[in-house]
Image: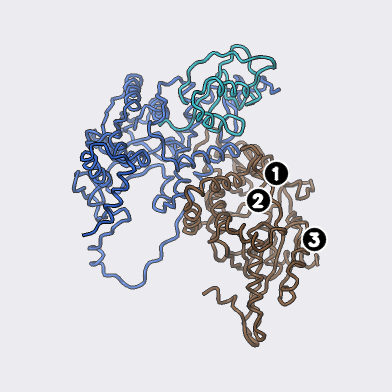
Chain colours: A blue, B cyan, C brown
Amino acid sequence: MPSRTSNLCERCEASKAVMRRPKNLQKLCKECFFHVFETEVHLTIEKEKLFQPGETVAIGASGGKDSTVLASILKTLNERYNYGIHLVLLSIDEGIVGYRDDSLATVKRNQQQYEMPLEIVSYKDLYNWTMDEIVSCSGVKSSCTYCGVLRRQALDRGAMKLGISHVVTGHNADDMAETVLMNLLRGDTARLESSTNITTKSTGSPIKRSKPFKYCYQKEIVLYAHYKKLDYFSTECTYAPEAFRGTARVLMKNLESVRPSCILDIIYSGEHFKLKQRKKRPGPKTPALQDQETEIRSDGSVSLQNNGNRCERCGYLSTNRICKACLLLQGLELSRAKLSIAADAVPKVEEDQLQRRLQHLSF
Amino acid sequence: MHSVTVNECTVAAQEPPTIRDLMYHITETLLVDKKDFDVFVEDGTIRPGILVLINDTDWELEGEDEYVLQDGDVVAFTSTLHGG
Amino acid sequence: MQDEKFKVKFGKSTAERPKVLLPLSYGSSSLALFDMVVSHLEEQCQNERAVQGYVLVVLHVGEDAARMERLRKKYSQVLEKLEAEFVTVDPAVFVRDLARVTVTEEYAVRRTENSESLDLQELLLQFESRSSRQDFWQQVVQEVALRSAVAHDCSVVIFGHSMSRLAEEILALTAKGRGAETAHRLTDGEIEYAGRRLHVIHPLRDVLASEIKEYVRLGGLQEMVATEESVKHKSAKNKTVNELVREYFETVESEYPEVISTVVKIGTKLDSPQGMAQQCILCQEAIYRDPKTWLEQMSESANKEVQSDVPLCYGCLMNLGVGGGAVWPVSRPSREEILAEYILEE
C-alpha cells in the first residue's frame, strides 16, 4: 500500500505536497506551487521582454481557465514586479448560444474581481454572422477553421478599437506542442518554423500577440485555477474540435503518460525546426518585373506586395486584396443565399450533391 | 465531463475500495451515455488528460488507481483537455 | 545522377565499385530490402561479360549469428554468383570508455570517472522507462552500424525504413526533443562519420509498412522475420514513444490515408539548424542550443552560476532526468581505433 506520509513538499520540506510537476516530477505544496508557477511566468516575461512600461495590454479573455489564470497572474505580477502596464480584458462574442452566454457572464465577473476594463466585440457586429449561423451553413466540421480566422481578426480589431497594440492570450505549452504536431501532420510548411514563437504578428497588422504561458503546462494551469479557487467557466465549446485535431490531442496525452516532459520536448524540437532554403531558379529577373508580380495562393487569395494594404471589402488591414475573413464569409454568403431559397428544406447531403452537380455544369 | 458535481456515494465495502473501484462504480451508476465510458476510462485506468484530485491532492502522489478510499474522502475528476 | 554509381559495370571497368552496407534487423522492411537488393544484383550478373555494380555488405547488430547463416542458406543459390559479405556484430563493441554522467537539480551536467564495468545489458537497464531504454538502444544500433560501415570500407549505407517507419521516427524524434536530428538522420544524403563521408539512403521511403508486409508474405520471407515484441497488451504507460506514435499512425491511417506521406514529405524539407555548438557526450548528436540555458529561462529553481562539466543534448538530459544519471560510453572511436578493433576481431 502506498504510504501517505512521505509526501512532503520537496521545496520547503515543511508542508504536505499536493501536486507533482509534469516537467521535472518535483512534488510541491500549494504555497510553493503558487510561488514557483508565478515566478516562472515572470521569468518568461522578463527573458522575452514581453512588456514595456506604460504599455496597455489587452488580455484575450474567454472566461475559460487559461485566460482567467492569465488575467489573475498578470495582475499579480504587474503589482509584484512593477511592470507598469495597464491591463484590459478583451472578449469575443462568437455567438454560440449556451456556450458563450455563460462564459461571457464569467468574464463580466472577472472584470469586477480583477478591476479591469472589459471590451466585448461580437462576430455579429463585425461580420454580420454568428458562429451558430456559420455552423448551420457550413456544418460542424469546419467550424474551428472559421472560428480561428474570425477570432484572430476580431481580437485585432477589438484591440485597434481600444487603441491597444498588444494582445496576450492564454495559449499554453500543451496548445503549442499540439500546434507543432498538427503542423507536421498537415505538412504545413508555412507555419512550421514560426509556430513556437512567443510573439507573433500578422503581416500588415500593427497588433502583436504574445503567449506568456508558452512554457506552462495545462495541468499546472488547471491546478492553479483550482487551488486559487478562480472563477472560470469550464464547458467545452459546443462545437467539438475537428476530429483530426482530436486524434493528435489524444496522441499527445498518451505520450505525456510515458514521458511527462514530452510537451516541453516537442516545443524544444519545434524551436529547432528549420526549412531548407528553397532553391532559387537560375536566370536573372528584372526588378521591375518583380514589382508587378502578384502571387496567387493555393486558397485563391491574391497576395499584394506592399504592407498597409486594405481589404477591398471590409477595409481592414490585409496583405491580400480580400482578407481571409472576408474570403471565408464570401463563401458562406453563397450558401446562405442558397439556404434561403431552399428554405432549410434541403438536407446537408443533398445540398452537397447539388453543389457538386452544379460544379459540373458548363455552358 | 468537466464540471464536477458533488455526488456522495457509498461504494460497497467488502474489500477496501480503491480509486479503481470508484472509477467502475462511476461508469456503472453515473454515466448516462455509454459513449462517455471511453472519454473517462482507457486501458482500465482513468484516461490520460483527466486530472484526479483526492482531497485536493494530485492522485499521482497518492498511488493513483491503488489508493484506498477512506470515509469522507473527496475525489475530483477534472478534464485538463480544452475548455479555452 | 547518384544512382549511376550502382549500375552494372562492363568489361574490365576500372570504375570503382562502391561497397554498400545494409543493416539488417530481421524486421520485415530490412528483409524486404535485402531481398530486393539481392535480386537486383542477380540481374546485374546475368550478362556474362558484366560485373555487379556494387558490393553488398549485410550487417546485423546482435548476438544471434546463426540467423545470418539461415538467411545465407536460403539464398545460397543466388549468393554463389554474387560478391557479398555477411557480418554479425556483437553490440558489445559499443561498450568502451565508460564514465558516469549525472544531471543536477540545476540542470548542470557532471561527469565523474567510473569504476564499474557494466556490460551492454546492464547499461541499458539503468534506464527505468522502456522508452528511454529504446531511445538509447537505437543509438547503439545506429552507432555500431556506422562504425561497421567504416570498418568494412563502405561508402554507402542503405536503411530499410519504410515510409511508415520514417513518419514514425519524425514524430517520435520530435516528441523526444530531438527534432533537430530529423534532417540528418532521416533524409537521404551524405553524413560525416569518423572522418569519412557516408552516403545514407532509405530506398523504401515511398513504400508503406503494410505493402512491405505483403511483399514479405508473397515472397515467402515470413519465416525469416524476427517476431516483434507485441505491445498490444501493454498499458499505455509501458509503451515507448515510438510504439505510441506507430499505433497512432495505424489508427488514423484508414481515415486519413495521406497523413503518413505528408509527414515524411515535410520531414524531407527540414534542414539541420545552423551553428553547431557542441556534441552531446552520450549520443554524439549536435547541440545547437544549450539545454540548460533553455530550461533556466522557465525554471524557478535554476541557478545560472552552476556550470556543466560536459555537454549533454536535450534529449539525453530528459532521458536521464533531473537528478538522474547513468554510466555510458562517452567518446566515439576514431577511424584508426575502429579499424584496429575490427582487425582484432577477425
Q: As shown in the figure, which amino acid type bears the numbered disc 3? A: Ala
Q: Chain of mark 2?
A: C
Q: Position of residue A240 (x, y in %)?
A: 41, 35
Viewer-nearest residue: B19 or A202: B19
Label 1 Cα neighbours within 10 Å, binned few <14 / some 14-19 / many ≥20? many
Q: Chain of mark 1?
A: C
Write down the residue under mark 2: C282
Write down the residue under mark 3: C66
Q: Which mark is residue C60?
A: none
Count all numbered tags in the image, as a single digit.
3
Element under label 3? helix
Visible residue check, residue A218: yes
**In the image, residue A331 above or below residue B42:** below
Mark 1 or 3: in front is 3
Q: As shown in the figure, which amino acid type bears the numbered disc 2? A: Leu
Q: Position of residue B13 (x, y in %)?
A: 66, 14
Residue at 51%, 57% in the rendered image: C272
Of labels 2 and 3, earlier in sequence is: 3
Write down the residue under mark 1: C326
Viewer-nearest residue: A135 or A352: A352
Element under label 1? strand
Tag 2 and tag 1, C-beta contact below 8 Å: yes
Q: Quadrant of residue C197?
A: bottom right
Q: Position of residue C280 (x, y in %)?
A: 61, 52
Q: Quadrant of residue A241?
A: top left
**In the image, residue C10 above or below residue A186:** below
> Disc 2 versus disc 1: distance between alpha carbons?
10 Å
